[in-house]
Image (cartoon, rainbow, N blue to C red):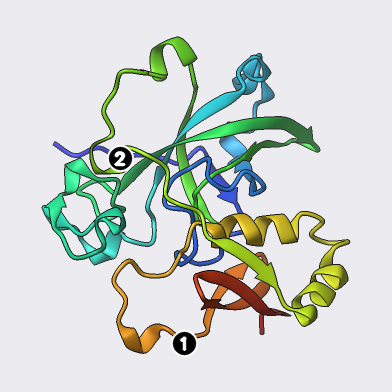
């Protein structure tokens, strides 16, 4: 038996690469995404009354991992990247059916010139991710306060983030186009997006990530992320 899933839309987010995407939704609240519905699903009646719900479930496809296949055992970052766990006991993107589930905050619906868009906040999705379905988040049923979280029982510890004098000037330069840029960078880096498994040779490494059309470079100095340079991507 085979099933064919058709995306209802594509989400556009600040995250241009897998590296530095938050490992869970809701950790970077300043990240705003826009779901652009495909023409055959651009009927605003599909979203009637959705504003009654503060949060939504997004069912999506890990579209960039499909060709890489999957494994029954994976290495979760929360376990340091060196312990194997069953794929169905994790949220790894390398899955048999490469489908994901994320809860996001509803922002607004926009319908202009026959095009339908849904704005959301706090997603952990790569730019261009296909959205397969959208469902309302129902607090009394979806928030189970007695549930156990296994190895992910609590949020990760946050790192402090500061900006060099040059980076501050660059943020000011881009502030018209990206008014929440400093908050976004801070919230992303506070999650410590570095690989879970690191060697001593990487202690002085300069890291880079892409947000929007910007390349952000930073280092970790004495346990603090220091943003050093922000440039438009080539």
Q: Position of residue 71 (x, y in %)?
A: 14, 57
Quadrant of the image occupied by residue 70: bottom left
Depicted 162 relative to depicted 151: above or below: below
Location of mark 1 (residue): 204
Q: Residue furthest top?
A: 140
Q: Residue at x 76, y 54 (%)?
A: 180
Secondary structure state at the residue bearing disc 1: loop
Depicted 132 relative to depicted 168: above or below: above
CA gap, disc 1 and disc 2: 47 Å
Secondary structure state at the residue bearing disc 2: loop
Quadrant of the image occupied by residue 144: top left
Marks 1 and 2, the one that precedes in the sequence: 2
Which marked residue is nearer to the observer: mark 1 or mark 2? 1
Q: Position of residue 178 (x, y in %)?
A: 79, 59
Q: Residue at x 23, y 37 (%)?
A: 150
Q: Residues within 10 Å of mark 1 (few under 14, many from 20)?
A: few
Q: Residues within 10 Å of mark 2 (few under 14, many from 20)?
A: few
- Horizontal side of 39 relative to 173 (left or right) equals left
Depicted 24 relative to depicted 181: above or below: above
Q: Position of residue 108 (x, y in %)?
A: 72, 30
Q: Which part of the image, by quadrant, shows the C terminus?
A: bottom right
Residue 4 — which label? Answer: 2
Residues at discs 1 and 2 in contact (Cβ within 8 Å): no
Q: Position of residue 167 (x, y in %)?
A: 75, 77
Q: Which part of the image, by quadrant, shows the N terminus?
A: top left
- Horizontal side of 138 relative to 173 (left or right) equals left
């Amino acid at each position: 038996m085979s099933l064919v899933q058709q995306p209802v839309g594509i989400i556009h987010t600040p995250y241009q690469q897998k590296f530095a995407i938050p490992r869970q939704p809701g950790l970077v609240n300043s990240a705003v995404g826009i779901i652009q519905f495909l023409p055959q699903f651009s009927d605003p009646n599909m979203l009637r009354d959705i504003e009654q719900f503060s949060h939504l479930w997004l069912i999506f496809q890990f579209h960039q991992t499909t060709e890489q296949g999957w494994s029954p055992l994976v290495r979760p970052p929360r376990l340091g990247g060196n312990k194997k766990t069953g794929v169905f006991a994790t949220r790894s993107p390398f899955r048999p059916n490469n489908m994901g589930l994320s809860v996001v905050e509803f922002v607004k619906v926009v319908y202009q010139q026959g095009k339908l868009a849904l704005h959301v906040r706090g997603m952990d999705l790569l730019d261009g991710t296909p959205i397969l379905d959208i469902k309302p988040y129902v607090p009394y049923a979806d928030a189970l306060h007695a549930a156990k979280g296994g190895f992910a029982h609590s949020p990760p510890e946050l790192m402090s983030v500061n900006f060099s004098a040059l980076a501050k000037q660059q943020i000011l330069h881009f502030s018209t186009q990206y008014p929440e840029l400093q908050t976004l960078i801070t919230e992303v880096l506070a999650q410590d997006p570095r690989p879970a498994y690191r060697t001593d040779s990487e202690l002085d490494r300069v890291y880079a990530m892409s947000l929007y059309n910007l390349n952000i470079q930073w280092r970790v100095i004495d346990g603090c992320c220091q943003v050093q340079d922000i440039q438009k991507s080539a």
